[in-house]
Image (spheres, rainbow, N blue to C red):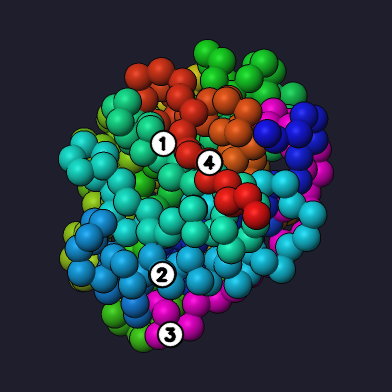
Amino acid sequence: MLKTGSVRALGAMSGTSLDGVDAAVLETDGAAILAFGESAYRPYSAAERKVIAAALGAWPGEPGAEEAAELVETAHAALLSGFDEVDLVGFHGQTLAHDPRGRGTHQAGDGRVLAEVLGRPVVWDFRSADVQLGGEGAPLAPFFHFACAKWIGAEAPVAFLNLGGVGNLTWADPSRPAPEAGGALLAFDTGPANAPLNDLMQARLGRDCDRDGELAAQGTPDETVIEAVLAHPYFLRMPPKSLDRDAFGDLARRVAHLGDADAAATLTALPAACVARGLEHCPEPPARLLVTGGGRRNPLMMEMLAERCGLPAVPVEDVGLDGDMLEAQAFAYLAVRVARGLPTSCPSTTGVAAAVGGGQISRPRAG
């Protein structure tokens, strides 16, 4: 049994970028954040990334899935074994396939293996229950974002904006009693974020990204292209809603007629325009945008975000949070909620039929 009161939970996250494993300790009772603990990162080697990338799209039993799972388990065990005095582990695994309206969702890695290696209870398979009840299975961070809004002392609704490959937004009203309460949360993907810009830089210039927005700052956004993208039916759909990384795969073609600087400027302004459009769905405008993900490191994108949304846009570090570890901390928080029988998603975050607690708990064998 999990002890009552405050728990030291260790969360781990391996994201779609395939760069490595983040791990972070959180002290929580499953409702409030009580303290942030230590954190660590283990990068994947080029060879390891190749193994995982080769398995993307694979379901259990299909070629590459078992090899990827073993690698993910080994990498997590190596990192997580370095943490002391932890009561519980939240293990997300590595998403290989996600088809909530079809075959379900597949995160590589078995929590039973980690429980034996670490000698601690492990909560894992967070998404399946939500999908089985008709939800998208994502995003799962909003319940943690609600706790973060409380922790920073927000008195008015705030929005947590993750600018990764795709943008996603959590609108949170900290005046509500709990994350599953009516009107407490709204979560959805806003549209393309860093992926199209990074793809453009790689294709045209052989660079991973437009560091600090230097190239985009030399160009001018093509508003005709931006308005054409915003005419996509996705932006009219009511949230919650989600996108695949390549849902707007025609963006390279849309900016093909532009020079490098103007194309970069257009694809830097586009995420901001998408967020501005998404904010129209929120119950009321948030007081500010708290930005996490790689986009927060692009000063031009942040400037465009504030300008187009008409709101202060600041990195989450400005309010004392760690943008690099937020997702790992989220799964530490969710692990405690699962162990306490509390919900981890609800209709306004994933579209699930009712508030549901996902995840299963694996404990090491006695002796």
For the residues marked 2 and 1, what is the alpha-carbon distance in whole angstroms? 32 Å
106 lies left or right of 272: left
Quadrant position of residue 312: top right
Q: Where is residue 338? Give x, y as percent.
A: 56, 33
Provide the residue designation for mark 1: 188
Q: CA distance from mark 3 to mark 1?
A: 32 Å
Mark closest to the chain's N terminus, 4 or 1: 1
Q: CA distance from mark 4 to mark 3?
A: 32 Å
* Quadrant into which the N terminus falls: top right
Mark count: 4
Please report the residue visible at 80 percent of the width from the left and 30 percent of the height from the top. Answer: 5
Q: Which residues are magenta?
A: 25-49
Circle 2 packing at 10 Å, graded few (<14), some (14-19), many (20+), is some
Q: Is 39 inside the magenta-drawn segment?
A: yes
User: Which residue lies at the image location 49% right of the left edge and 28% below the top edge?
Assistant: 357
Residue where numbered disc 3 is placed: 46
* Residue contact between numbered discs 2 and 1, judged by CB atoms under 8 Å: no
Label 4 – label 2 distance at C-alpha: 19 Å
- Please say if the residues under marks 2 and 3 sit with CB atoms less than 8 Å apart: no
Q: Amino acid at mark 4?
A: Ile
Residue that carries the numbered disc 2 in the rendered image: 70
Q: Is residue 260 visible?
A: no
Question: Marks 4 and 1: CB-CB under 8 Å?
Answer: no
